Amino acid sequence: MKLHTSVSGGDRLGDKLRQIRERLEKNKGVLIGVPAGLGDYAEGAPLAVIAAVHEFGTTIKHPGGTSYGYASEKDAIAGKSRFMKSGTGFMQTGVTGAHDIVIPERSFLRVPLRQNKDKFVKMFRSMIPKVVKGELTMQAVMVRLGGQGVRVSVEAIDSGIDPENAPSTVAKKGSSKPLSDSGRLRQSITFIVED
């Protein structure tokens, strides 16, 4: 006995595969971070620059010339010296010389996102069948991945990122947990879907 088979609808299958490929290729990726132009800190530094400094760490070559001393008579009695504007305060006791200010790397983006890579891959793979069926767009997939990426980064900040703040920073800000002083950096983390 001979078996005879025939295939019909090949053109429709080819069209459907092209549509699926176009849906999958339409969006190229999602960027997670603090975009340029999002705003500035009160001191005038752009949020994106401050984010990059914390993400990668840096050394600032300070030229010196910053006055320090006692802001009030009460501070002088207590021995609480602090930086102050030249010509202000109760008593200036000195001026800093040239020195380096080292800000350590505190990755709130690369490291936590890399640590969660398998979760992102699993999430992406779970949504692809819906894209193939036309139940979900790639734009929606990228938005979901971006939202999850933002959550991962924010949770990393909330959990605390090493190294802890220096004792001088703890004295000034009241916390050993870095990147959480005003919450402005944390609130600025967002995502952009690439076209």
Image (cartoon, rainbow, N blue to C red):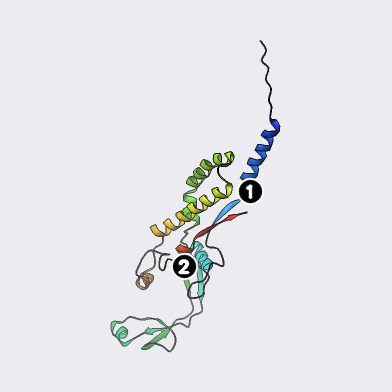
Residue type, label 2: Ile
Mark carried by residue 103: 2
Mark 1 → mark 2, Cα distance in angstroms: 40 Å
179 vs 121, left or right, is left
- Circle 1 packing at 10 Å, graded few (<14), some (14-19), many (20+), is some
Taking depth in this image into account, of 150 and 172 the one nearest to the observer is: 150
Residue 176 - label: none
Numbered tag placed on residue 26 in the rendering: 1
Q: Residues within 10 Å of mark 2 (few under 14, many from 20)?
A: some
User: In the displayed structure, does residue 126 sit left or right of residue 162?
Assistant: right
| Label 1–label 2 contact, CB within 8 A | no
Q: Residue at x 52, y 64 (%)?
A: 52
Q: Residue 53: horizontal and vertical position, in percent?
A: 51, 66
Q: Position of residue 143 (x, y in %)?
A: 53, 52
* Mark 1 or 2, nearer chain start: 1
Residue 161 seen from this side: no
Quarter assignment of residue 69 = bottom left
For the residue pair 12 and 171, the one nearer the viewer reads as: 12
Quadrant where the image shows the N terminus:
top right
Picture coordinates of residue 148, whole percent (x, y): 48, 52
At a point 55% along the width and 42% down the height, the residue shown is: 135
Q: Which quadrant holds the C terminus?
A: bottom right
Residue 127 can be seen, yes or no: yes
Give the structural element (helix, strand or loop) at label 1. helix
Specify the amino acid type for callout 1: Lys
Residue found farthest to the top: 1
